Amino acid sequence: MKEVKFKHKGWEVAAIIQFPKDFDETKIYPAIVCAHPISSCKNQTSGNIYGKALAEAGFITLAFDASHQGESGGEPRFLEDPATRVEDFRCAADYLTTLSYVDNGRIGVLGVCGGGGYAVKAAMTERRFKAVVIVVAANYGRIMREGDYTPGAAIRTLEAIAAQRTAEANGAEPFVTSYIPVNEEARKQTGINDIDIVEAVDYYTTPRGKHACSPNKLLFSGLAAALNFDAFHLADHLLTQPLHIVIGDRPGAFGSYRDGYELFNKAASAKKSFQIVAGASHYDLYDQPEATGKALEQIIPFFKEYIG
C-alpha cells in the first residue's frame, strides 16, 4: 500500500494505491478505481474492504478521498458537488495511465453507496473504464429530492439553500451541518429507527468504521447542485460497459435496493449481472465479513472476466 496524490484542476486528490502480492513493477496489471460512499473516505469501505480484497486478487486498486473532503484538496471544505465528484474519477483514470505497470486497456471502476452512483455517472462518459461494479449504489440526487418524504421537500430545501447563500454572501459564517445524527443518543432523540440510519450511525460514529477523514460534516450552501443531479440519467444510452450490481435484501431509507433494480433495468450494458446478498443490509455490505465476502465471490470473477 502506498499513499499518493493526483491532480484535479488546481488541487490534489489524496489516494491509496494497493498492490497484488509479489507485485513486480516491470510487469503490467489491470487496475480498479474504488470510490467511497457519500460522507465516507478512502480509509473506510472503498479502500480497506473492497480495494484491499481486489488487490489481494491480483489487481492494482486506487481508492481516493473526494475533492473538498478528507485529505484531498479543494475549497470550500466539506462540499459534496456531483460534477466535481464525477471529475474525480476521470482524474483518477488519468493518474493510472501514468503508471508504467498499469494496463491502460484494463481499467475498471467500483463504487459503494453514493460512490456507486457517481461511478455509474462517470463510466457513461469515461471510456477508459472497461467494467463497472456498484455495491449498494445510491442515487444521491434522488435521496436529496425526496428529503423527508413530505410534499414539497425539495423546494423547501432549495429555498433554505438560497437563504443561506444570501446570508453567506453578506458576511455570515458558512453553515456546516451533518449527514447523520452525531451519535446513537442523538439518533434516538430524532425518533428515526430506519435500518439504514441506525446502521449509518453505528458505522460512522463508533470504532466500527469511524475515521478522522470522515468527520460527518456537510456544507449546506453547496447542496443545490445535488437536487437536480441524477446518477442514472442517460444510462440507457451511454452505460454500455459490462456491469455488476450488488444489493442486500434488507431495504432501508437510502434506497440502494430499488436503485439497484432501476439501474439494472435501465443500463444499456449488453452484459450485466445482478447479485442479491441474502440477509444483508446496506451497511453489512460496507464491512461485515460474511456479506462482503459473498459480494466479492462474484465481484472478483466479474473483474477477472472483463479486465483480468
Image (spheres, grey):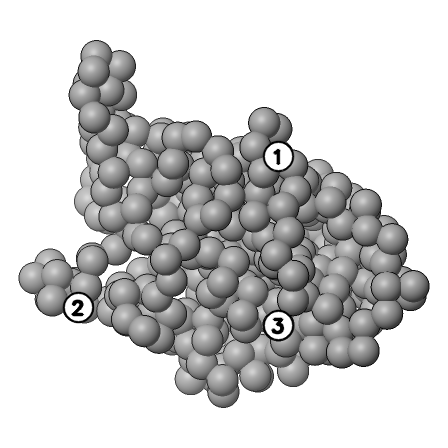
- Residue 6 horizontal side relative to residue 187, left or right: right
Dot 2 falls on a residue whose secondary structure is: helix
The residue carrying pointer 1 sits among few (fewer than 14), some (14 to 19) or many (20 or more) residues within 10 Å by Cα, namely many
Circles 1 and 3: CB distance less than 8 Å? no
Residue lying at the far top in this picture: please name it. Answer: 170
Residue pushed farthest left? 189
Look at the image and tell me in which quarter the N terminus lies.
bottom right
Lower position in the chain sequence, tag 3 or tag 2: 3
CB under 8 Å between discs 3 and 2: no
- Residue 138 horizontal/vertical position (percent): 46, 55
Q: Which numbered dot is residue 219?
A: none
Q: Amino acid at mark 2?
A: Glu
- Image location of residue 220, percent across then percent down: 28, 35
Q: In the rendered image, which residue does mark 3 sit on?
A: 52
Q: Residue at x 30, y 46 (%)?
A: 217
Q: CA distance from mark 1 to mark 3?
A: 24 Å
In depth, the one of 293 and 251 nearer the eye is 293
Residue highlighted by disc 2: 184
Compared with residue 246, is residue 137 higher up or lower down, i.e. above or below? above
* Picture layout, residue 98 above or below residue 175: below
Q: Is residue 285 visible?
A: yes
In the image, what residue occupies the spot 22% across and 33% down?
A: 175
Q: Say what amino acid the circle numbered 1 marks.
A: His
Label located before the other in sequence (1 or 3): 1
- Labels 1, 2: front one: 1
In the foreground, 209 or 147? 209
- What's the CA distance linking mark 3 and mark 2? 29 Å
Q: Which residue is mark 1?
A: 8
